[in-house]
Image (cartoon, grey):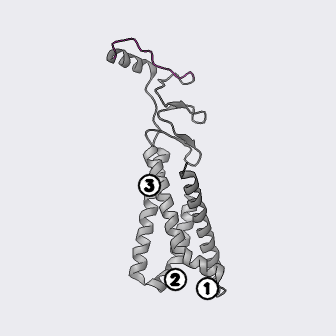
Amino acid sequence: YSLQGFVTYAYFWHAVPPLCETVGVPTCSAISSVGVFLLMNALYNYTKAIFTPAGLPPPFEKAQLELMELSEKQITPRQCSKCKLLKPPRAHHCSVCGVCVMKMDHHCPWLNNCVGIANYRYFFLFLFFLAQACLFIDVVLGIFFYDIIFTFGRRGTRSFRNYIMMSFMICASIFAALCLLGGF
């Protein structure tokens, strides 16, 4: 939340006033509305990915009884040796969380939660909207960043230049990491 808060502050406090002078208030409002839409979706899906449990398998005894009722032949389901729950295919025991997770993808340290069957959708949408929001900030702040780096006009105050440069670099780094890691 802190990086998103910093970039949001830098955008609305330092970038919007000169942007409104350049393109006009109606266009600036439309551009900012797109940014707020992307930010709200990223924050919503981030929060849902954190607080939605990853998906626990059912207790072993209950699953064994259901399996015996449905099947004609004797099938013995697998059981996790650590938590004693049913272990269906693609279920793994997370050593960090200490539970079995159905269709476990990975344990995400940024969420402090496993990504599994129940919260994979929110995790993917968070990454998608985060990438879009970073691209949005890089495009909007790219004009100011170019002026700060390649022209010597010293447009704006020192804090304006620092906030724009820092926000641009944060978003460019996150976008590059998402593109590189998302390709795997």
The magenta region covers 71-81
Residue type for callout 2: Pro
Q: Which residue is mark 1?
A: 155
Q: Residue at x 53, y 75 (%)?
A: 13
Q: Residue at x 63, y 69 (%)?
A: 166
Neighbour class for label 3 at 10 Å: few (<14), some, many (≥20)? some
- The quadrant of the image that shows the N terminus is bottom right
Q: Position of residue 141 (x, y in %)?
A: 54, 74
Q: Earlier in the sequence, mark 1 or mark 2?
A: 2
Q: Which residue is mark 2?
A: 18
* Residue 14, visible in the rendered structure: no
Q: Quadrant of residue 14?
A: bottom right
Left/right of residue 130 with respect to residue 73 in the rendered view: right
Query: What's the magenta bit mostly, secondary-structure-wise?
Result: loop
The answer to which of 176 and 45 lies nearer the viewer is 176
Q: Residue at x 57, y 33 (%)?
A: 94
Q: Earlier in the sequence, mark 3 or mark 1?
A: 3
Q: Position of residue 40 (x, y in %)?
A: 44, 60
